[in-house]
């Protein structure tokens, strides 16, 4: 019997990540090749015409899994009945703007969209925040949607996770699908800590630790980390636009693994509401290694954290605490 369609909201759908993301969702990349979807696309009035153009292209693409498209500038209409919400819309930093100005714009957007989701989304809606500052936007959304369980509100650090896998695969000249269990700790910002201490590569003679194969701790503790931390900026420099196809692909990976589960023995990185695991600050959205089963994520516990890593976990945690304070100061 055919499955009931799942309603997926994409905010900022007329933007560049939206343009890469909606066809992936309509093709089954996010929820599976047998899962029909109804796309809800939200943008702001100045982008309404462009949004309608995206809707026209979705119709023209004749995706068999796509059972309907809602394209609107009304947050209530966009949020009504959605099972998955991918929050890509936000206010970008413009010339001359201070960090606080960008935070203030996004805090008010995420505050109002939190209410629309809380009141109109389907029960148990899963939320993924992509728009920057992703962790803190997700935290604001959580604070202003108190009836949505905290475990349903996450932010995207899977792009950073995938970037780390990509760097290791290039360094060792192995398939990226043979590399696993890197970790992104903390903030989706340049203070994030990409950690390979538990990562492995599948080789013809079995699974081997990345450190044993790379044999270059200076690279792993230096250039590897800064490359992953600065990759977003490198893409902006090269494209004059921020990453879009890789961000859209990572958003699909994040939701797919969350809904359908992570493979046995594999974890992924997700920004989730911190319970203080690994002595990360509690009460912020912090990226941890997680496994997913039956639609629920669980933080992987018991991993050894050496002194080098400890400092980096703390540093990114401090930044998240400061962002939280800044966000709250914008609310008052
Ligand atoms: P973009 O400017 O091309 O698109 C953003 C869209 O959001 C625009 O169409 C805009 O009209 C819309 N928008 C603005 N305010 C809105 C609101 N209140 N409601 C609904 N829509 C609204 O930007 P993009 O390149 O698609 O990037 C989107 C966001 O994702 C940015 O904040 C970017 O920094 C972030 N990003 C995050 C990651 C990550 O890994 N977490 C990676 C790449 C980009
Ligand atoms: C990315 O990681 O590519 C983006 O978050 C960069 C950015 O600042 O938009």
Image: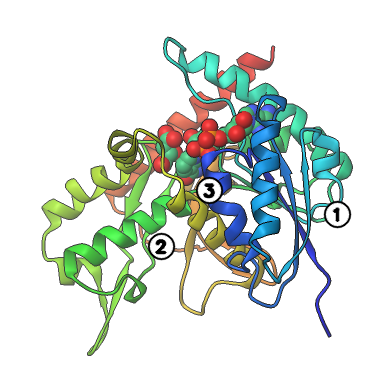
**Of residues 304 and 150, which is closer to you in this image?**
150
Residue 66 occupies quadrant? bottom right
Q: Which residue is mark 3?
A: 156
Q: Answer yes or no: disc 3 within 8 Å of ligand 1.
A: yes
Q: CA distance from mark 3 to mark 1?
A: 22 Å
Question: In what quadrant does ligand 2 lie?
Answer: top left
Q: Sequence order check: which comes first, mark 1 or mark 2?
A: 1
Q: Sequence order check: which comes first, mark 2 or mark 3?
A: 3
For mark 1, give the secondary structure: loop
Residue 274 occupies quadrant? top right
Q: Sequence order check: which comes first, mark 3 or mark 1?
A: 1
Res 247 label: none
Dot 2, crowdedness within 10 Å: few (<14), some or many (≥20)?
few
Give the x, y percent position of residue 99. 47, 17
Residue 52 vs 331, above or below: the answer is below
* Rendered residue at 72%/26% (across/down): 45
Give the x, y percent position of residue 135. 55, 38
Q: Which residue is mark 2?
A: 303
Quadrant in the picture for the N terminus: bottom right
Q: CA distance from mark 1 to mark 2?
A: 34 Å
Q: Which residue is mark 1?
A: 123
* Rendered residue at 56%/38% (across/down): 15
Asked if the residue under mark 3 is in contact with the one under mark 2, i.e. CB atoms within 8 Å, the reply is: no
Q: Is residue 281 visible?
A: no
Q: Is residue 111 left or right of residue 23?
A: right
Q: Is residue 92 visible?
A: yes
Give the x, y percent position of residue 86. 65, 48
What coloring was used for the rendering?
rainbow
Labels 1, 2: front one: 1
**Of residues 8 and 167, which is closer to you in this image?**
8
**Of residues 235 and 120, which is closer to you in this image?**
235
């Amino acid at each position: 019997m055919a499955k009931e369609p799942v309603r997926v909201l994409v905010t900022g759908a007329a933007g560049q990540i939206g343009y890469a993301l909606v066809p992936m969702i309509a093709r089954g990349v996010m929820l599976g090749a047998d899962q029909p979807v109804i796309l809800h696309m939200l943008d702001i009035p100045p982008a309404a015409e462009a949004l309608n153009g995206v809707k026209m292209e979705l119709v023209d693409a004749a995706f068999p899994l796509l059972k309907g498209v809602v394209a609107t500038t009304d947050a209530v209409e966009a949020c009504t009945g959605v099972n998955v919400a991918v929050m890509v819309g936000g206010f970008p930093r413009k010339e001359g703007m201070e960090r606080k100005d960008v935070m203030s714009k996004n805090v008010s957007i995420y505050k109002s969209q939190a209410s629309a989701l809380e009141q109109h989304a389907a029960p148990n809606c899963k939320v993924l925040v992509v728009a920057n500052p992703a962790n803190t936007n997700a935290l604001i959304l959580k604070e202003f949607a108190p009836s949505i369980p905290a475990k349903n509100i996450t932010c995207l650090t899977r792009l950073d996770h995938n970037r780390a896998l990509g760097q290791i695969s290039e360094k060792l000249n192995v398939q990226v699908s043979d590399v696993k269990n890197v970790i992104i700790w903390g903030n989706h910002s340049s203070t994030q800590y990409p950690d390979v201490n538990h990562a492995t590569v599948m080789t013809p003679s079995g699974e081997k630790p990345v450190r044993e194969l790379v044999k270059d701790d200076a690279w792993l503790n230096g250039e590897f980390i800064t490359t992953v931390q600065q990759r977003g900026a490198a893409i902006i420099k090269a494209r004059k636009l921020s990453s879009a196809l890789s961000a859209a692909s990572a958003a699909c990976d994040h939701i797919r693994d969350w809904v359908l589960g992570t493979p046995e023995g594999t974890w992924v990185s997700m920004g989730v509401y911190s319970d203080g695991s690994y002595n990360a600050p509690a009460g912020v959205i912090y990226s941890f290694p997680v496994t997913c089963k039956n639609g629920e994520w669980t933080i992987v516990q018991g991993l050894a954290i050496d002194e080098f890593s400890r400092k980096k976990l703390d540093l990114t945690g401090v930044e998240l605490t400061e962002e939280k304070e800044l966000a709250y100061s914008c609310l008052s």
